[in-house]
Amino acid sequence: MRWFRVGGSGPAAEDATRTSRPVGAERDPRRVTAFSDGVIAIAVTLLVLEIRPPEDTRRLLHGLLELWPSYAAYVLTFLLIGQMWVNHHVMFDHMRSADRLVLLFNTLLLMQIAFLPFVAAVLSSAFRSGHGERTAVVLYGLSYGMAAVLFNVIWEYARHGRRLLAPTIDPAGARAISRRFRPAPLWIAAGTGVGVLNPFAGVVVIAAFIPFYWLPIKGEIPSLRRARERGSRD
């Protein structure tokens, strides 16, 4: 099977071929996803540990209600990390292998995801105290924005010249996934910018990111169906 296509001959064609080759040894992507699943599972578990019970149990209901920023940060961050988990599988389910650069980019992505419980705690603490909300929203947005950029970097690197893609995805399906990933950094940057002016509105814009990115990716499912049909004929 040909994983990339190069036209012409000579030095230019050789350069094009070289840019489409994996960097270093190729690894089983299932091991990458297994490790990533573990890191993501720990990150979402740590979120709930940041919610501290009220110290004054004589006014327990009032104290629980005052923790609403912690609940909101927990729900928002849990859903966003869950969304990352789903889209991480979208990427790696269509990769036949992972090379050294994919391992590096994925490590940076996991480092960013592991940082998110901290930024969620900062966000909830700022809204509870009423101080530093703008800084907290900017930190929150920058953290998610970096993760969104890394998603794009991993996918575009893997699909360039079909360098690392499996036959489960055709070019139309690969483009469909790219179209879903590309707006994410801009969307989060917009929410972060709004948060500088109005912290609560900024969080709302970032939260609006959730329902859109949980939708199925048009083009990916037909691509999978065609791949299965080809496999059954073979």
Image (cartoon, helix red, strand yellow):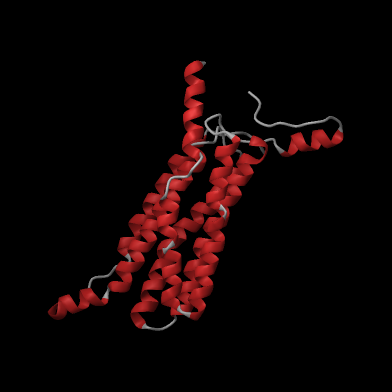
- In this view, the residue in front, 176 or 88, is 176
Residue 82, compared with residue 129, is above or below; it is: above
Residue 142, compared with residue 183, is above or below; it is: below
Q: Give the residue drawn at x 86%, y 35%.
A: 11
- In this view, the residue in front, 192 or 176, is 176
Would you say 113 lies left or right of 70 here? right
Q: Position of residue 191 (x, y in %)?
A: 50, 69
Would you say 59 lies left or right of 177 here? left
Residue 142, compared with residue 151, is above or below; it is: below
Q: Is residue 174 visible?
A: yes
Q: Position of residue 32 (x, y in %)?
A: 49, 40
Q: Give the residue drawn at x 65%, y 30%.
A: 3
Q: In the rendered image, which quarter is residue 199 located in? A: bottom left
Q: Is residue 107 visible?
A: no
Q: Residue furthest right?
A: 10
Q: Position of residue 215 (x, y in %)?
A: 42, 49
Q: Give the residue drawn at x 52%, y 53%.
A: 109
- In this view, the residue in front, 185 or 219, is 219
The quadrant of the rendering that contains the N terminus is top right
Would you say 8 lies left or right of 222 here? right
Would you say 233 lies left or right of 80 here? right
Q: How many marks?
A: 0
Q: Residue furthest left?
A: 58
Q: Give the residue drawn at x 13%, y 80%.
A: 58
Q: Position of residue 94 (x, y in %)?
A: 52, 36
Q: Residue furthest top?
A: 234
